Amino acid sequence: MTPGYDEPRTIEELKTWFKEHGYEPAQTRFFVGVDVRSPKAFGIYLDEFGEYVVYKNKADDTRAIRYQGYDQEYAVHELYQRFQQEIINQQTRWAASNNSNKQMRSPAFDAFDQYERNEMLKERARRLPLIILLVFLAFIFTLKFMLRIQSKMDKNFGLLTGLAPLVAMGLVMIFSYSWLNGMKVTDFIGSLSRKIRNGISVAILIYLLVFALANSNVQSNGYYSINNNLYYRAGSNWYHYDDHRHDWERSHYVPSQLTSSSWKDYNNTGSHQGSYESFEQTLYYTNWSSEQRSYSESHDNGHDYDYSSWSSNDWNSGYTDWNSDW
């Protein structure tokens, strides 16, 4: 089984993914790199024999082993996919209950919570290097986010794509400067001159105007051939056909022509020389099609649930089915 491109492939990557998305192990009961023995817990860890173990501790304190072996990527994939299923379950149950103000946490894993608190205190002691890193990441992640949203919405945001990372950097710098100097953000903004505040307001208005005017279409799903290199666009992901391996692979690089206004010129396979395997026969296409069907079915099944206000803070481990084997 080949995990998707955006999936974590190692335990460390999975741990980072959980942290970046704000999912606390003590709340979700998904533990990465930890062999938890208490009831109601999912997890993955490397045992003393060098094998990766993916497990579920059920409500009755029995343990079900989902995978035990030496393939770390497969093990991580199993837990990651189970967590994705649980996110859907959490959102559905939360929306149905309409009880977002009553957040419930399962019994905390005290040792893990204490470790997290200590780590947080250490990070606060190293504020300046962290601020530099946050400013840099704000630019990178905002740019990636804009490109992803641009693809999903089939719109070319143009100048907005370049402006958004700069705005994100500016906001991070404002909050970081306030934090570094022990000031409230409102106090810091109030200390700025009227001229600077007016300039910031004008910049925000221009940004919103550019966003409102960004309405030109971009690529559609399908085959693209450029310089005899064959690509396939499936949603927000691009894939490239390797003529030597005779197989499709996730593309980390997409030619600029395919993201410009001339993209339609390459939306065909007629100019491609040589044979190639159909992308529709790959696992990539199967997974993507399944996601598309699941999304469509969730909108056509008569439930008008609104998940837009759901966040990781609304996670309730009581919604999880702890009696099943997985």
Image (tube, rainbow, N blue to C red):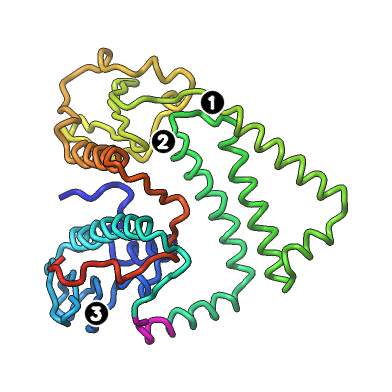
Q: Residue 244 vs residue 231: left or right?
A: left
Q: Amino acid at mark 3?
A: Asp
- Image quadrant holding the C terminus, namely bottom left
Q: State the residue position of label 1.
A: 215
Q: State the residue position of label 2.
A: 152
Q: Amino acid at mark 1?
A: Asn
The span picked out in magenta is 107-114
Q: Secondary structure at mark 1?
A: loop
Note whether 124 is above or below 132 in the view shown. below
Q: Secondary structure at mark 3?
A: loop
Q: Position of residue 3 (x, y in %)?
A: 23, 50
Q: Earlier in the sequence, mark 2 or mark 1?
A: 2
The local crowd at label 2, few if under 14, some if 14 to 19, many if 20 or more residues have their Cα within 10 Å, is some
Q: Position of residue 304 (x, y in %)?
A: 37, 44
Residue 35 circle label: 3
> Was residue 82 drawn as part of the magenta stretch in this picture?
no
| Residues at marks 2 and 1, CA–CA distance in whole angstroms | 13 Å
Residue 86: quarter of image? bottom left
Q: Residue 308 vs residue 70: left or right?
A: right
Q: Are marks 3 and 2 in contact (CB under 8 Å)?
A: no
Camera-side residue: 56 or 173?
A: 56
Q: Position of residue 87 (x, y in %)?
A: 32, 58
Q: Residue at x 48, y 29 (%)?
A: 155
Q: How many marks?
A: 3
Residue 240 circle label: none
Q: Amino acid at mark 2?
A: Lys
Q: Earlier in the sequence, mark 3 or mark 2?
A: 3
Q: Earlier in the sequence, mark 1 or mark 3?
A: 3
Magenta span dominant secondary structure: helix
